[in-house]
Each structure stands twice: as C-alpha cells, then as structure tokens.
Image (cartoon, rainbow, N blue to C red):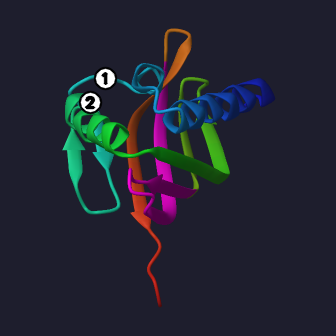
Amino acid sequence: MSVELTKDLDDFFRSMRQAYNAQDMKLFRSHFWTDKRFVNLDPSGRTDHGWGSYEEILDQEFRYMDSVKLELKDLDIQIFDDSFGTASGEWRIEHVDPEGRGVEQSGRVTFSVVRIRDDWKIVQQHLSTDLVGA
C-alpha cells in the first residue's frame, strides 16, 4: 500500500464529504459507482440496490433540508493490489429542516472502493448508528 494511494483516497473522501455538504448531487454522484449493482445499507435498516434507488432518497433529502453536514472521522484505509480498498471509521450527520429543526445521527461506516480506470468509486457503503444507552 503506497502513501500516494492512501493520500488519494483521503482526498477522495474529503471531496465526497464536501460535495454532500454543498448538496451538489452531480459532484457527489461522481464518487459512486452508478451501476445497478451498487448497494447502500443505511442506519435505518433500508437497503438500496442500485444507484438510482439511493440517489432518489438523497435527492429528496437535499431538496427538503436547508442544510446538511457530513463528517467522516478516523477513517482506516486499506488498499489491496492498488485497485481495491476499504475505509471504515466514524460518521456524523446534521440536518436542518426549513423550520430550523436540527437532527443529528452518528455511527460507524464502511466503504468499499474500486479503482475504475484512473478514478476511485464507492461500490458499496454501510452505515450503522450508535446505540443510545448501550
């Protein structure tokens, strides 16, 4: 695992987070494999098969919320054969609706990424929430 590839993935996840926070669907989408085999496992227990299903949910979220803020923390990046990797760590999201009400969630996240041509793409992600009072 080269230092350059690890830095590439650090930059990749920073760019993905910034696109989410800017509610820029086009830029955010560019970080993902938009194939029908993409899988998103979200903290509510919903499983989205295919990019289109996940994008629909995000589009509704971006349209409804006044602001969103995604943080990724302590990502442990592992790269295999310079073309496949995983990143796991902590996530935190804050949403503010049009009436000023805020909602926060946090938990653990795992991303599976593949190098396609010269770009990294998230091919699968799994988010879980922290259990309160556990």
Callout 1 touching callout 2 (CB < 8 Å): yes
Kind of residue at badge 2: Trp
Q: Is residue 114 magenta?
A: yes
Q: Position of residue 42 (x, y in %)?
A: 33, 54
Residue extending furthest top? 117
Q: Position of residue 23 (x, y in %)?
A: 46, 33
Q: Position of residue 27 (x, y in %)?
A: 48, 21
Rounded to the nearest whole Å, what is the CA distance between mark 1 and mark 2? Answer: 5 Å
Residue extending furthest right? 3
Q: Is residue 131 above or below residue 59?
A: below
Name the residue beneath numbered marker 2: 51
**Residue situated in front as seen by the camera: 57 or 66:** 66
Q: Which quadrant of the figure has residue 66?
A: top left
The magenta stretch is 91-115
Q: Main secondary structure of the magenta part?
A: strand
Q: Is residue 12 above or below residue 30?
A: below
Who's the residue at 65% across and 50% down the image?
76
| Label 1 environment density (alpha carbons within 10 Å; few <14, some 14–19, many ≥20) | some
Q: Position of residue 98 (x, y in %)?
A: 38, 50
Q: Which quadrant of the figure has residue 32?
A: top left
Kind of residue at badge 1: Thr
Answer left or right for 75 relative to 103.
right
Name the residue beneath numbered marker 1: 34
Q: Is residue 32 magenta?
A: no
Q: Which of the marked residues, 1 or 2, is nearer the chain's N terminus?
A: 1
